[in-house]
Amino acid sequence: MEVEKKNYYEVLEIETTSTPQQIENAYIRARNAYSSDSVALYSLMTKDECSSILGQIEEAYSVLGFPEKRREYDRIRGFNVGAAGTTTPSQGEQLQYESFGSNSIESKVSKITAQKKFGLDYSENAEMEKRILECIEYTGPFLKEIREYKNVSIERMADMTRISKSQINSIESEITDKLPADVYIRGYVYQIAKVLKLNPDLVANSYIFRFKKNKNQK
Amino acid sequence: MNIEHSQLPQNTKKIWAIGGGKGGVGKSLVSANVAICLALMGNKVVAVDLDLGGANLHTCLGLPIPQVTLSDFVSKRVTNFQDLLVETPIPNLKIISGAQDELGMANLKHMHKNQIIMKLHELDADYILFDLGAGTAFNTIDFFIAADKGILVVLPEPTSIENTYRFIKSVFYRRLKMVEGVAEIEHYIDEMMNAKLGPGSTTSPADLVKKITEFNPEVGLRIKNEMAHFRPNLIINQVRSQADIDIGYSIQSICRKYFGIEMTFPGYLDYDQSVWQSVRKRKPLLIEYPNSKLVNNFDRIVNRLIES
């Protein structure tokens, strides 16, 4: 393909009012795109075409990447006349490339899907709620009671926590010899508490504390 | 030739086509989950499986093999197009399935294709999604062009990228030939088109347009206007690193230089184990794995697609 002569801003595909940071980013992106190991180039351009484009990119950056040289270039080419655009970031300038890093769009979809998957469907019972609220030491049988109260079947619990049914059973009935090492138990109880919308730290800590105490007594 | 947009009923419904040259890059998965997103947001959505030779959109949505498909319409077993709509477990979302094993359906006749496009435009929905097949068959290309928005699914792999360029090239020339006045210089264009894609070919499509403009400014301007509407949206699937995401920007820049077209990059999808698990379980990913990073990925992509 033909490589035509463009101004340095066109080469880097940026606005003439870009900030130094935008120029820097555009340079890195452009260099990535046309470097010899770029996957995106595959099947489309020859080595010569690429090195010619890369040469232009380097040349453009060697001027625009340095404020003094950029001012001189702008002056000769008549860019940014009377504007302080080269040093101060211009307002309202749409970023050429938006970053995907932070996502401010809090959309409904994640919430809806989470609701579908993790929502609990049960009728509240004041007495039970009070017992849960006042509980500071969670036992296996009580966890089972809460689970049944909140209408979560053992299958659903296993599905949501990825803990096997038999291990959930062991945790609930506190059959110690069927359970893995303590650290795993803590993780399991934590997951179960999360699904039941309890305070997972409190539940896991109190469970494991009792559990260890009982074990030592034996 | 193709149906002009002006001939079709005008309303606010939007048609998005999901394509991309290569097979197995996640077109059906993207179609299914974008459809679910739009439906969960409260839109009436119809997802249409236009992968006529290898339909599997229903599998991605967790549906059994549908009883009625597009081939029933083509063979006139079903006369009312509405009857092809199949309900899904997700409220607001219906699908029309592609053909199953119907010999010859993959090579839909021109007349049938136009009829289907017409009928699809008449459907009562806020969003209609086309899940296209792999390859660059004329049918696929024409369904892609018939949509308001084209979405290309690409993997960060040379094979997928190569086929994506090939797909863009096919759409480019198909659109080019639709431009009035191009017919007279068609032999010239054919010569270009048959030249090998990529390295070794001396002229890029952007150069071709430039040459046509020098040769015939009026036609050149019309081509430029036509190509201004060709703004495919790029989705990079199975991203494992920042370098994979950057490929999206690279493709954007390269397409601008090589094809002279602008591309939008609404986002990427992280590589996630749960994808194949959900497909294997035949359950829709977004519903089955709400904690997956992919939910946020799709959220962002769909929001950006709606906005653009």
Image (spheres, grey):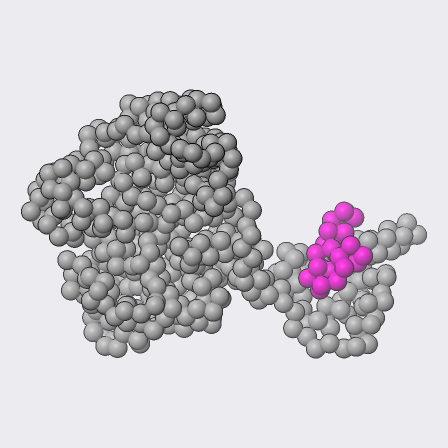
Closer-to-camera residue (A72/A210): A72
Please name the residue shown 35% across and 52% down the image. Answer: B151
Please name the residue shown 80% across and 62% down the image. Answer: A140
B257 left or right, relative to B288: left
Magenta region, main secondary structure: helix
Q: Is residue B12 visible?
A: yes
B299 left or right, relative to B213: right
Q: Quadrant of residue B156?
A: top left
Magenta-tinted stretch: A181-204
Please name the residue shown 47% across and 72% down the image. Answer: B91
Residue lying furthest left: B184
Magenta includes B152?
A: no
Closer-to-camera residue (A65/B197): A65
B146 above or below B198?
below
Magenta includes A202?
A: yes
Closer-to-camera residue (B236/B12): B12
B79 above or below B207?
below
B146 left or right, relative to A67: left
Residue lying furthest right: A217
Tell me where residue B277 appears, x and y as whole percent: 51, 54
Q: Quadrant of the N terminus of chain A?
A: top left
B116 left or right, relative to B280: left
Tell me where residue B144 appears, x and y as whole percent: 28, 55
